[in-house]
Image (tube, rainbow, N blue to C red):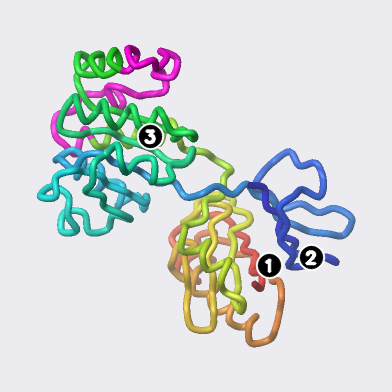
Amino acid sequence: MIRTTYLKGKREGIREYKLPCDIDKIPSVYEKNGERFFVENIEDPHRLFIFGAGHVAKALYDLACFLDIQTIVSEDREDFLNANRFPNAMRIITSDFDKTIPELGIRNTDSVVIMTRGHKDDYVVLKSILSLSEMPGYIGMIGSKSKVAYVFNSLIDEGFSKEKLKAVHAPVGLPFDTETPSEIALSIMAEIFTTRHKKGVSVVEEKTKKALSEIKNGIEVIITEKHGSGPREVGTRMVVTKDSVIGTIGGGSLEAHAINDAREMLNNNINVLEKHYSMNNNDASSIGMVCGGDCNLALVKL
């Protein structure tokens, strides 16, 4: 979804979902006819669906948590899948695989990794995934070449095309030497990032998206430009109210300054403010940052 946020001019503060002119680079800040605006491509957050809750699944879940990826874990054995083993999962599901998958709302921005306890369940899960109206952006299935061949041949016998099965990464993970669950999880996550990671796309976390739609008296803080190193990418945002902060633009003193500026805007009824932070060694040290470079923020009243 292409979103335009007007920063200066007659339409100051207005957010639209169309482009006011031809633009060759997104995300970017543009100026035309006295208007200044920030244009970006917004996608839903990347979610990881893990089918199975064994040792490798647990290691992959732990790595996903470290990377702030929303994770949904499904397993039909309640002794393996519980809130104690997967405390930060967005959701845990212990019902039959084929019954739950159609109701999960899997999107093309999501990744799916299949690592159940055996051929039968792998087959059931993969068949259900390939039958969805919207395919996930990444599908991976763990297992030996013989196991993968068994599942694929069974699906071909069911009428699935070889072309459709080419979308499945199996055996899953980048091909480097792995032995432990953590090493296997690393190879899987590396393949997911190699396949799914996109530059130039703004990803808005669910809690921030909810705040943007519900809060009526707050400030949206957006990173609109960044040169050199910085804590977060262009398009990262947070929402600031008089007594709360939802989301993050990277923490530290930069975020603290932005929060203070946002609350000053609320107190003084200011609609839009652009702030520039020069993060060379001296300036970065003065505001408590370790990154170098330059960062521009747009603060827009909701």
Marks 3 and 1, the one that precedes in the sequence: 3
Of callouts 3 and 2, the N-terminal one: 2
Q: Residue 59 at what x, y percent from top left?
A: 20, 43
Cα separation, mark 1 vs mark 2, equals 9 Å
Residue at left offset 43%, top offset 60%: 290
Which marked residue is nearer to the observer: mark 3 or mark 1?
3
Kind of residue indicated by mark 2: Lys
- Is residue 144 shown above or below 103? above
Write down the residue under mark 2: 8
| Circle on res. 201 | none
User: To which residue does mark 3 refer?
Assistant: 192
Report whether 86 appears left or right of 243: left
Examine the rendered structure and indicate whether residue 194 appears above or below residue 74.
above
Q: Position of residue 234 (x, y in %)?
A: 57, 52
Point out the tag, 1 or 2, that comes first from the N-terminus: 2
Q: Residues within 10 Å of mark 3 (few under 14, many from 20)?
A: many
Question: The C terminus is located in which quarter?
Answer: bottom right
70 or 248: which is nearer to us? 70
| Circle nearer the viewer, 1 or 2 | 2
Local crowd size for mark 2, using a 10 Å CA cut-off: few (<14), some (14–19), many (≥20): some
* The quadrant where residue 171 appears: top left
Closer to the observer: label 3 or label 2?
3
| Residue 248 shown left or right of residue 188 in the figure | right
Q: Looking at this rendering, what residue extends furthest in the bottom direction?
A: 267
Q: Which residue is mark 1?
A: 274
Q: Residues within 10 Å of mark 1 (few under 14, many from 20)?
A: some
**Tag 3 and tag 2, C-beta contact below 8 Å:** no
Q: Along the line of sight, which residue is nearer the eye, 69 or 227?
A: 69
**Magenta span has 224?**
no
Residue at 53% over, 57% down: 236
